[in-house]
Image: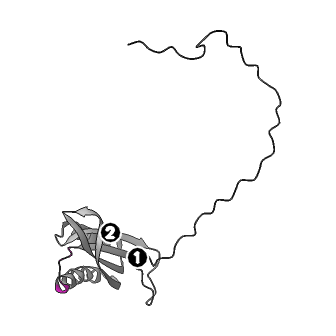
Amino acid sequence: MRAYELLFITYPDYDDEKISAIISRYTEIITSSSGTVATTDRWGKRRLAYEINEMREGLYILMTFTADQAACSEIDRLMKIDQDIVRHMISRLDRLPEPGEKLRPGKRPKAEEARVEPAEQKEAVKVVAEVPVPPETGEGQGQPEPKQR
């Protein structure tokens, strides 16, 4: 079994009972396929990056779980047709977080920034041979004539 992270957005006006029902619905699907739910974090109401169905905010919920690929694709299929889910995303994790470790937005370790070091000064280029340049005899040589319309 593999570790997965499921992030989904519901409507912002849902009460706690409705959200608990949605979470338990998908928890039941995971556990019925011999998977286990590690954590369920309610991030709360947050502003969306862009407007979806004339909605500017949504309730974000993050679940981490272990399951086989069939259960993961079944969750994806059901979330696509669920009217309570605005958007969802399932990501495969390398490992599950430790019990005390919480994965919250902005709390993940930042990747080390790439440092650009100044280029070292190169040696001067040694000229081996010069190529003779043909002399220009008339105006506009080497340039195409403008097209007439």
Label 2: few (<14), some or many (≥20) within 10 Å? few
Q: Where residue 2 appears, x then y in whole percent? A: 41, 76
Along the line of sight, the residue nearer the viewer: 23 or 9: 9
Q: Which residue was labeled with disc 1?
A: 105
Quarter holding the C terminus is: top left
| Residue 94 rendering spot, x and y as whole percentages | 47, 75
Q: Nearer the viewer, residue 58 or 17?
A: 58
In this picture, which residue range is highlighted in magenta? Answer: 11-17
Q: Tag 2's secondary structure?
A: strand
Residue 147 visible within the image: yes
Quadrant for the N terminus, please. bottom left
Check whether the beta carbons of the residues at disc 1 and disc 2 lie within 8 A of each other. Answer: no
Which labelled disc corresponds to residue 128?
Answer: none
* Residue in view at x 51 percent, y 76 percent: 109
In this view, the residue in front, 35 or 91, is 91
Q: Residue at x 17, y 77 (%)?
A: 13
The secondary element bearing badge 1 is classed as loop
Q: Colour scheme used in the picture?
A: one colour
Residue 110: x and y in percent read: 52, 73
Residue 8's quadrant in the figure? bottom left
According to the image, label 2 marks what residue?
89
> CA gap, disc 1 to disc 2?
15 Å
Q: Is residue 45 above or below residue 141?
A: below
Confirm whether the magenta stretch covers residue 12: yes
Q: As rendered, which of 122 and 41 lies closer to the eye?
A: 122
Q: Name the kind of residue labelled 1 in the image.
A: Pro
Q: Residues within 10 Å of mark 1 (few under 14, many from 20)?
A: few
